[in-house]
Amino acid sequence: MSRWLVVGAKGMLGTDLLAELAPSEPEDSAPDDSELGESPGAHEVTAVDRDEIDIRDPEACLAMVDGHDFVVNVAAWTAVDEAESQEAAAFAVNAVGAANLARACAAARVPMVQVSTDYVFAGDGSSPYSEDAPLAPRSAYGRTKAAGEWAVQALCPQSWIVRTAWLYGAHGPNFVKTMARLAAERDTVTVVDDQSGQPTWTVDLAAAIVRLVEAEAPFGAYHGTSAGETTWFGFAQAIFAELGLDSSRVKPTTTDAFPRPAPRPAYSVLGHEAWRSAALDPLPSWRKSLTRAVPIVVPR
Ligand SMILES: NC(=O)c1ccc[n+]([C@@H]2O[C@H](COP(=O)([O-])OP(=O)(O)OC[C@H]3O[C@@H](n4cnc5c(N)ncnc54)[C@H](OP(=O)(O)O)[C@@H]3O)[C@@H](O)[C@H]2O)c1
């Protein structure tokens, strides 16, 4: 039985991580010998969010980490545009909070997973960013998450940095839900076609994080994004198709036509070599996962 602490457990990824760590339902409810013993890979999970801990408090982190075998930090300031005008507040969570957990993990000798983002890269490349590509964030959010990565690796060498991007899932606001809502409200929906990335289902990422930890994979950076790539426009068309709607109702536009406070990376495609080096499967293709995800993320 391994004891996990999930911090940020009520968030979009945290909720699916808890589901992934929960004991699976037995196929037959009749008791048999296998139910009397402990199943391999069983987890005891402490799930905490802002109500139970503020990761900006170093003492609270020290007290919380003790007694666990693994810590996964999915708590974050995720409001990308708001971070532009409130960078210090975002830094307090994404950098100082991550550092507090990392220091506590190092003191208790507990390995830690720190979830990070594609926004740590410049996003102006033309081939997938490798795990050791230089960090060059262009937004306040990206700077605070890059500082969080640096702090975790400096303070807790027994750590995995898992960078993800374009996340969607059943338990938080996201692009898939927004497209489903707009499809019901409007005849056409206009979506940017000059930003590329990897739509990633929280269920796939949660499973990959658990695989990474249970395999005792080498510590370091991993890219927790789907295989393949598309643009937001291509993603929107695929969502319409999965909803049984006419995807020609989605119209392409450019980033310039949609100004936002935080700059968006034009090219956010991440490479997946570290999974292969660790003899682990990377995440599945974004398109196949979308087919599985849509009925769960947008239930009819
Ligand atoms: N969503 C994406 O597209 C995306 C893309 C790239 C990377 N990521 C990364 O993936 C991870 C998970 O993202 P998500 O979308 O699941 O995030 P989320 O839904 O916003 O969940 C984050 C959770 O952290 C909690 N939290 C915030 N500040 C805290 C604090 N000081 N102490 C304790 N808990 C705090 C939040 O509580 P409140 O709700 O009360 O604030 C929330 O429950 C984050 O590290 C994020 O940076 C996400």
Image (tube, helix red, strand yellow):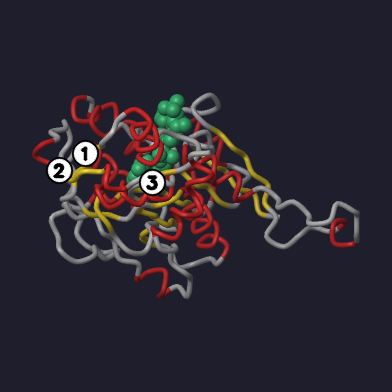
Q: Secondary structure at mark 2?
A: strand
Distance of mark 2 from mark 1, alpha carbons?
6 Å
Closer mark to the observer between disc 1 and disc 3 = 1
Q: Amino acid at mark 1?
A: Thr
Identify residue for label 3. 167
Q: Decide if residue 191 is on the left or right side of residue 117.
A: left
Residues at discs 2 and 3 in contact (Cβ within 8 Å): no
Tell me the residue that label 1 is attached to: 190
Residue 159 drawn at (x, y percent): 43, 56
Ligand 1 is found in which quarter of the picture?
A: top left
In the figure, is residue 144 to the left or right of 59? left
Question: Which of the pair 279/268 is nearer the observer?
Answer: 268
Q: Would you name the residue on which mark 2 appears?
A: 253
Query: Is residue 281 shown above or below 144?
Result: below
Image quarter hosting the N terminus: bottom right
Q: Is residue 55 visible?
A: no
Report how far apart the C-alphas of labels 1 and 3 lie in the structure.
20 Å
